[in-house]
């Protein structure tokens, strides 16, 4: 007969409920460290100043701003020094030897002027993207905000007029300020250089800085005037007055639009933005997908669009959780399209806003490759890539030749490969889901994220000119097709009151007004769908309809959420009509 040992008895005891003094499932102040919903931007900025790495910050500023500024201001001095040297050689030329010297100088100039020009051009547009356009957008929104608040936040057509006038006023005022700066600094500039100057670089420091200030101030002055009046003339956003009616017998597409699901990699994980004020884990998203699957079984969907921020910080664990949730619903996955949001590619450290990437950090490229891998897994065989190396190929086909490079980079890193893959990332967009027939519905998937190095500025958006050009080329290639234009960032500030100015800056598409003008000629056959702000808004800029998706996840812990299934219909005139959407409610999970 076997006797039961005391140890075996202890192993059979029922588990005892453990109630710690600090319940880790409820989180603590560390979970609110970067939460803009729990802390003010001023408080986060204070923590940032206390914890930031000044060495990395100074180096990032030097590489991103100071070095481009120096090279831009130095370019005219180098160019004129070469012209002066070449002229002297021509004047002194006698005999065969001198002629050879002259030819050598000309050859060097012919070979060297193109790289010099490209360098100056690159640095000019770098400063434009980092400082000039964001500065103008900040100024414009500040004036709009002050005007709207002082006039008691009017609405409708009256608000549209106020916004138009504010844009023009912002352009005029910034023109005056920037012009005064250029005029004041002009006496310190020097535009003619010599070889002797180049031999004593310290003598060129102040003229170089002055040159840069005058160049960028003059550009800002005239550009802000042009931008201000262009923004004033563009159609201002208004709430959609009424949904369209479906024409008899028209083809109708059902599109579920979700955004900002912010998947976390832990069962009890909190999110960067909401901290302890938001839900834990991924139960809400699982519930949303289960609800969507049931609706799809009753009435099939054509598309499921998730317009960015699939993850909370772009980590491997978060992408694994997202793909597991999607993989549990193969019928939905076969119709799904995803695109990158700022939380997928720009969050340096989800717990510390003081962390920053260096401009050439491989980790930046790694986050993009994670997002790209997920997009290829979800829709890679259905969308075509824009890269010139593989025209007309699917995303999966375009990436196949880079597979080894991407896998090796993910395993081992490397600065050279990081730079190469960062260029690939920008060249791929827009990704295109082509229409199934010449007058069908296509989807253009855009990357609207600005390249930022700092968690504190992670939310900025910027539409690259090359990407916009490739988009319009696609529209022109399918002249009868209708389109969903899908991106993460909002093109314009909504015509609704905001509690604080911080809601109007730091999150918008910096050149959104310009992109609206790009889309205007195609507006009747486009619906723009985006996320980012977690706002439930449907409106229009002229004929261009814009749909902003609420987040089915990001809400107070015990609050319900929702999303929409949109119905889009083909109009007999070639237009794309937006019908009344179906609202899908998501209750807070039990025990949340």
Image (tube, helix red, strand yellow):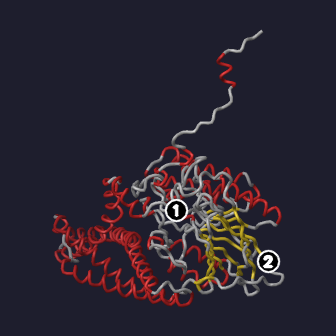
For marks 2 and 1 on the same chain, the one whose residue lies earlier in the sequence = 2
Label 2 to label 1: alpha-carbon separation:
34 Å
Q: Position of residue 516 (x, y in %)?
A: 55, 80
Q: Secondary structure at mark 1?
A: helix
10 Å neighbourhood of mark 2: few (<14), some, or many (≥20)? few
- Front disc: 2 or 1: 1
The answer to whether 291 is drawn above or below residue 93 in the figure is above
Q: Is residue 315 left or right of residue 199?
A: right
The residue depicted at 43 percent of the width and 85 percent of the height is 150
Residue 438 falls in image quadrant:
bottom right
Residue 446 visible in the shown view: no
| Kind of element beneath mark 2 | loop
Callouts 2 and 1 close, C-beta under 8 Å = no
Q: Is residue 51 above or below residue 463?
A: above
> Percent position (x, y) of residue 288?
70, 59
Residue that appears at 65% across and 22% down: 10
Disc 1: which residue: 342
Alpha-carbon neighbours of circle 1 within 10 Å: few (<14), some, or many (≥20)? many
Whole-percent x, y for residue 33 in the image: 45, 54
Depth check, front residue: 158 or 233:
158
Q: Position of residue 255 (x, y in %)?
A: 72, 69
369 vs 325, left or right, is left
Left or right: where 473 falls relative to 218: right
Task: Report the residue marked by disc 2.
Answer: 251
Q: Quadrant of the N terminus?
A: top right
Q: Residue furthest top?
A: 1
* Observer-nearest of 282 and 420: 282
Q: Which mark is residue 207?
A: none
Q: Quadrant of residue 469?
A: bottom right
């Amino acid at each position: 007969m076997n006797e039961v040992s005391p140890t075996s008895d202890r192993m059979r005891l029922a588990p005892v409920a453990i109630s710690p003094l600090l319940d880790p499932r409820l989180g603590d102040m560390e979970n609110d460290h970067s939460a803009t919903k729990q802390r003010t931007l001023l408080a986060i900025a204070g923590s940032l100043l206390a914890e930031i790495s000044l060495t990395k910050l100074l180096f990032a500023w030097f590489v991103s701003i100071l070095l481009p500024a120096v090279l831009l201001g130095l370019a005219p001095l180098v160019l004129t020094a070469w012209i002066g040297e070449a002229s002297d050689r021509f004047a002194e030329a006698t005999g065969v030897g001198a002629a050879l010297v002259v030819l050598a100088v000309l050859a060097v100039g012919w070979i060297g002027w193109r790289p010099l020009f490209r360098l100056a051009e690159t640095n000019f547009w770098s400063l434009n993207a980092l400082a000039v356009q964001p500065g103008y957008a900040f100024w414009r929104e500040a004036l709009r905000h002050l005007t709207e608040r002082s006039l008691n936040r009017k609405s409708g057509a009256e608000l549209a007029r106020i916004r138009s006038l504010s844009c023009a006023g912002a352009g005029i005022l910034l023109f005056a300020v920037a012009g005064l700066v250029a005029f004041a600094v002009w006496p310190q500039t020097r535009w003619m250089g010599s070889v002797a100057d180049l031999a004593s670089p310290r003598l060129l420091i102040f003229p170089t800085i002055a040159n840069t200030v005058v160049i960028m101030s003059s550009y800002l002055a005239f550009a802000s005037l042009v931008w201000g009046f262009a923004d004033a003339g563009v159609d201002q956003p208004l709430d959609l007055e009424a949904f369209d009616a479906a024409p008899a017998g028209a083809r109708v597409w059902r599109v579920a639009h979700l955004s900002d699901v912010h998947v976390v990699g832990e069962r009890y994980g909190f999110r960067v933005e909401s901290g302890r004020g938001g839900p834990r884990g991924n139960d809400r998203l699982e519930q949303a997908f289960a609800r969507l699957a049931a609706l799809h079984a009753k009435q099939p969907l054509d598309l499921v669009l998730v317009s960015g921020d699939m993850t909370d910080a772009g980590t491997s664990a978060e992408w694994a959780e997202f793909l597991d949730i999607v993989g549990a619903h193969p019928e939905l996955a076969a119709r799904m399209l995803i695109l990158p949001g700022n939380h997928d590619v720009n969050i340096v450290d989800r717990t510390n806003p003081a962390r920053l990437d260096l401009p050439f950090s491989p980790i930046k490229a790694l986050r993009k490759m994670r997002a790209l891998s997920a997009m290829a897994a979800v829709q890679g065989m259905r969308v075509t890539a824009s890269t010139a190396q593989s025209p007309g190929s699917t995303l999966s086909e375009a990436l196949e030749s880079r597979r080894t490079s991407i896998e090796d980079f993910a395993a081992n890193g490397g600065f050279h490969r990081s730079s190469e893959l960062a260029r690939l990332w920008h060249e791929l967009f827009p990704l295109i889901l082509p229409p199934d027939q010449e007058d069908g519905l296509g989807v253009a998937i855009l990357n609207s994220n600005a390249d930022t190095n700092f968690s504190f500025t992670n939310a900025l958006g910027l539409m690259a000119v090359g990407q916009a050009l490739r988009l319009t080329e696609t529209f022109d290639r399918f002249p009868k097709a209708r389109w969903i234009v899908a991106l993460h960032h909002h093109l314009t500030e909504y015509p609704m009151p905001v509690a604080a100015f911080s809601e109007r800056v730091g999150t918008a598409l910096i050149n959104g007004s310009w992109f609206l003008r790009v889309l205007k000629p195609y507006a009747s056959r486009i619906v723009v769908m985006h996320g980012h702000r977690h706002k439930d808004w449907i409106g229009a800029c002229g004929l261009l309809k814009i749909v902003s998706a609420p987040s089915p996840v990001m809400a107070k812990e015990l609050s319900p959420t929702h999303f929409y299934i949109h119905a889009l219909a083909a109009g007999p005139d070639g237009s794309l009509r937006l019908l009344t959407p179906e609202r899908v409610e998501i209750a807070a999970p039990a025990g949340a």
